[in-house]
Amino acid sequence: MRLLIAGWHGLVARALIEAAPSRPEIKALAAGRPALDVRDPRSIERAFGDLSPDMVINSAAYTAVDKAEHDRDAVFAMNRDGAALLARAAARRNIPVIHLSTHYVFDGGKPAAYDEHDQPSPATVYGRSKYEGECAVADANPRHVIIRTGWVFSTAPNGFAARMLAQAQSGEHLRVVADQRGNPTYAPHLAAAILEIACRLAAAPSEKNGASDAMPWGTYHAAGSGEATWHSLACELIARAPAARPSAAPEAIASSDYPAAAPRPVNATLNCDKFERVFALRLPPWQRGVTECVAALAAR
Ligand SMILES: NC(=O)c1ccc[n+]([C@@H]2O[C@H](COP(=O)([O-])OP(=O)(O)OC[C@H]3O[C@@H](n4cnc5c(N)ncnc54)[C@H](OP(=O)(O)O)[C@@H]3O)[C@@H](O)[C@H]2O)c1
């Protein structure tokens, strides 16, 4: 299967590209700006023409949540209109699209984990653009799987894990928000699950061949198992990294002590039961992701 991964330098895209060689049935074709700009239909047509994909994963997005509050037109041009252009170009070729989305489609006010039946209620420009992007993708291409995830962490040099460990190691006093809950998701775990779904989509009989389309298209929640706060995630990272010896444990602070332009959901947790029920897949516990992430960082 020729799998086009849009947004090649992004956190999730990099994890997908790194995981793809473990799936011999996949030939990963990564593309991103300037070669593929998903806001530009000609650029999309050129990429489809040059790469002839059988399936598309859209991990390209405007993800600067705070900046988005004052950059509405650019955010919607990318997260809604660009997402729709890519999904529509795929639909014209009868190609499925796997589209990444986020817990930010919810405002975080629900006490329990959000499931796919909960009505989105985004409280930020980013969240609204992602929700409208989901709707636009679903309208543009009936053969879609939308995957909402959250709190993705990786070994990226400027990512949460590397920053926490570097600051702890340098003896810097760490202050980390402790009143938001989410499901930390180790990027390679998410990537492995997405590639598994891509392989199943590719293996399913398609309408193109006259068979009834057996795939459960739709929206799914997929995030690391178990919940945490940013503070407990930071503590776990530091506890697993022998080289990071802070003079004191990270200080737990409130969101109000760390003001941001876009409000962060108090509850970002996602109920992933549907993902497990339909695909028999559950992402590993986030603590396992921390262990693997710290080991990968130490091996550098
Ligand atoms: N990271 C998380 O914690 C998280 C959580 C929930 C959901 N998600 C979702 O997962 C997806 C991937 O997120 P991520 O964290 O990997 O994002 P990211 O690291 O910010 O990467 C986004 C990528 O999109 C590319 N991009 C932006 N505008 C583009 C355009 N017009 N055409 C083509 N590419 C463009 C960027 O390219 P440039 O390098 O050229 O800027 C960048 O490589 C997004 O849909 C996001 O909403 C992420």
Image (cartoon, rainbow, N blue to C red):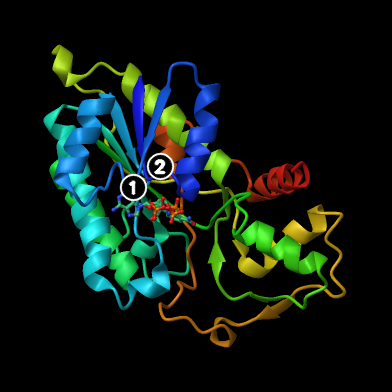
Looking at the image, which residue is at 74% across and 49% down?
294
Q: Which residue matches tag 2? A: 274
Which of the two discs, 2 and 1, labels the residue nearer the N terminus? Answer: 1
Q: Which residue matches tag 1? A: 33
Callout 1 secondary element:
loop
For residue 97, above or below residue 232 = above
Where in the figure is residue 65, as x and y percent of width and height? 40, 69
Looking at the image, which residue is at 40% across and 23% down?
199
Query: Within 8 Å of ligand 1, the CB of disc 1?
Result: yes
Q: Is residue 33 visible?
A: yes
Where in the figure is residue 172, as x and y percent of width and height? 78, 75
What separation in Å lies between label 2 and label 1 (alpha carbons)? 34 Å
Q: Amino acid at mark 2?
A: Lys
For residue 53, above or below residue 286 = above
Quadrant where the image shows the N terminus: top left
Where in the figure is residue 86, as x and y percent of width and height? 21, 42
Callout 2 secondary element:
helix
Q: Quadrant of residue 130?
A: bottom left
Q: Amino acid at mark 1?
A: Arg
